[in-house]
Amino acid sequence: MKKTQLGKHGMEASAVAFGAWAIGGWLWGGTDAETSVDAVRASLDAGVDFIDTAAVYGFGLSEEIVGKAIQGRPRDKILLATKCGLRWDIESPTLHAESDGRRIFRSLKKESIRWELEQSLKRLGTDYIDLYQTHWPDPETEIAELVDTLEELRAEGRIRAWGFCNETPEHLAQAAKLGRISTDQERYSLLDTGQNTANLPVCEAEELGFLCYSPIAQGLLTGKVDSKRQFPAGDLRATSPRFTPAVLEALEVVLPPIVSMAQDRGVTTEQLVLAWTLMQPGVSHVLVGARSIEQAVSNAAAGSIELSKEELAMISKAADAWPGFEALG
Ligand SMILES: NC(=O)c1ccc[n+]([C@@H]2O[C@H](COP(=O)([O-])OP(=O)(O)OC[C@H]3O[C@@H](n4cnc5c(N)ncnc54)[C@H](OP(=O)(O)O)[C@@H]3O)[C@@H](O)[C@H]2O)c1
């Protein structure tokens, strides 16, 4: 497993991280806690030392599952990342989403972050977070106030490092001037290179880790999702505009060369896609979700795959046939 720098402050972690959203169940059609614990442990056993969760995933359940999975493991050998800023228990001026009869609000106010951190620490069964991330921007909180809060928590040793998700290049640059930001986390995959590349130049200039979320496009890039696949009620993919017949049809053009290259190399399609993603300029880590031991072990193995220049170019060429989600909408 390759290890890569998480920003410029001396932290590193496995290039493949375990993404713990789906094991929280919410928006993924439920979860089996025991299987999820096994999946996280299998990932750690396969060389992954980086876990990305969030308070809001399963409304605390994902963090509890991760906490259980890491019990008894050497804490200093795991890079634990979680997120704050989406509250389902209070209201704020900015509604983020409504789902399952719950309303989720954004807040990155100091007192809110401090409260959230304590809850996350309890659920994760630890007394510090390695990487604390803001989940979505809060228009009510100035970047200077936010940086001040995060730097306070770092000085107190409650967090080792901090980063942003779903942010603008301007806010990243501002945060880098005001404090010690380490990472930016954005949606980025072979099907989603365009919309977030705006952040990459800032990440490069400020030496921030660039963490790709949904790197296999929530399963679309496994080659195993076709029109016959039925998603259960409560799985966001059942109604997602990113899982339409038009998208699946376009993938029938994009994926075959990648599937066939994977077969020739004796790896899986998603492993090849993850390896390609990790080799894109500026990318430091992929955060990939897994809900079973098999998926966790398979995804971890992608962190050891090296692609030649020719192979990289062939995969990029296949990706050129992708018209983009917007064009298919
Ligand atoms: N900061 C943010 O706002 C944000 C947003 C989204 C995600 N994230 C982070 O990024 C992580 C990953 O993103 P994601 O879960 O949205 O998408 P993803 O990693 O692209 O896809 C995960 C899904 O793909 C399927 N899968 C995974 N490995 C597989 C394998 N080896 N073979 C076949 N299918 C496989 C599984 O679903 P099925 O088996 O059910 O098909 C799994 O739940 C999250 O867990 C979270 O940590 C962050």
Image (cartoon, rainbow, N blue to C red):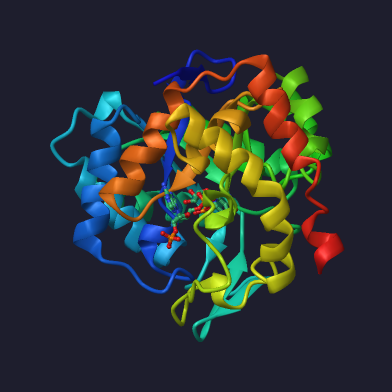
Q: Quadrant of residue 29?
A: bottom left
Residue 298's place in the image compared with 2, above or below, is below
Residue 202's place in the image compared with 244, above or below, is above
Most foreground residue, 59 or 245: 245
Most foreground residue, 310 or 105: 310
Q: Is residue 91 visible?
A: yes
**Residue at the outermost right position:** 327
Who's the residue at 45% across and 32% down the image? 16
Q: Quadrant of residue 17?
A: top left
Residue 84's place in the image compared with 59, above or below, is above
Residue 62 x %, y %:
35, 57
* Residue 197 falls left or right of residue 185: right
Residue 114 x %, y %:
47, 49
Residue 156 x %, y %:
42, 30
Who's the residue at 39% across and 21% down the image? 1
**Residue at the outermost left position:** 72
**Residue at the outermost bottom position:** 101
Who's the residue at 71% across and 48% down the image? 254
